């Protein structure tokens, strides 16, 4: 009987630990927990100035009464950032077709501001069809980068190939500059539906 009670106690401790770590079994990964936090708590996001692809200074925030869509990239990325840019281009087209583009600002924000100068940002913008009006590609000042990534919960880790590993998502920011949703980069339908609401 004693071994059974010991095993039962260990099992209960394990279940309790899993319950706590997974936020009541609602978030199995760190990314899932980040998304759940955004939906439930709607934290206010930092809104630093960015240098955009034309060398102009723009504020990372929605227009009054509108929303902003924010993704994080670096222009030399050979994989996920290219796909993210293509997805953002499709999203821009869908927003226009649905008559929703007027109140939306889109930002592709580089987390590699030392290398992503306006020329590199401009090349990325041209490759993906960022128009500089609705969709801007920009980089924050190096001094603003850590707080920006932390605020959005973006993890960036340098790799052995002079690049980065990072999480990729579309962040929906409401008119009060609050994070109200995080979507997979290919969840265009989900983003359009959230903006419609």
Image (cartoon, rainbow, N blue to C red):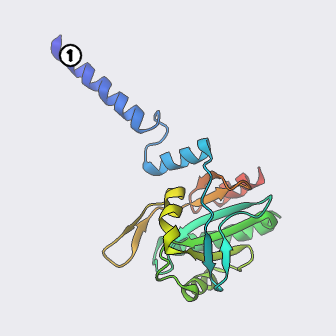
Residue 160: % across, % down: 30, 75
Residue 83: % across, % down: 54, 72
At a point 51% along the width and 61% down the height, the residue shown is: 147
At a point 33% along the width and 78% down the height, the residue shown is: 161
Q: Is residue 168 visible?
A: no
Residue 181: % across, % down: 62, 51
Residue found at the far front of this picture: 143
In-front residue for pair 116/19: 116
Circle 1 packing at 10 Å, graded few (<14), some (14-19), many (20+), is few
Quarter-wise, where is residue 66 in the image? bottom right
| Residue hosting label 1 | 4
Picture layout, residue 66 above or below residue 144 = above
In-front residue for pair 3/40: 40
In-front residue for pair 170/109: 109
Picture layout, residue 77 above or below residue 68 = below
Quarter-wise, where is residue 100 in the image? bottom right
Picture layout, residue 100 above or below residue 122 = above
Residue 109: % across, % down: 57, 71
In-front residue for pair 19/109: 109
At a point 60% along the width and 71% down the height, the residue shown is: 108
At a point 22% along the width and 21% down the height, the residue shown is: 7
In the picture, which quadrant includes the N terminus? Answer: top left
């Amino acid at each position: 009987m004693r071994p059974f009670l010991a095993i039962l106690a260990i099992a209960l401790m394990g279940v309790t630990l899993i319950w706590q770590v997974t936020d009541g079994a609602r978030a199995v990964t760190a990314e899932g927990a980040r998304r759940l936090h955004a939906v439930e708590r709607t934290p206010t996001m930092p809104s630093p100035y960015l240098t955009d692809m034309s060398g102009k200074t723009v504020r990372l925030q929605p227009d009054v009464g509108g929303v902003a869509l924010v993704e994080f990239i670096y222009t030399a990325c050979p994989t996920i950032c290219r796909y993210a840019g293509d997805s953002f281009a499709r999203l821009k087209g869908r927003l226009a077709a649905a008559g929703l583009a007027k109140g939306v600002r889109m930002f592709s924000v580089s987390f590699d501001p030392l290398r992503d100068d306006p020329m590199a940002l401009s090349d990325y913008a041209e490759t993906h069809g960022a128009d500089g009006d609705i969709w801007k590609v920009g980089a924050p000042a190096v001094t603003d980068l850590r707080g920006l990534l932390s605020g959005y919960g973006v993890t960036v880790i340098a790799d052995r190939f002079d690049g980065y590993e990072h999480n990729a998502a579309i962040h929906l920011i409401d008119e009060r500059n609050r994070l109200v949703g995080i979507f997979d980069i290919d969840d265009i339908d989900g983003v359009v539906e959230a903006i419609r609401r």
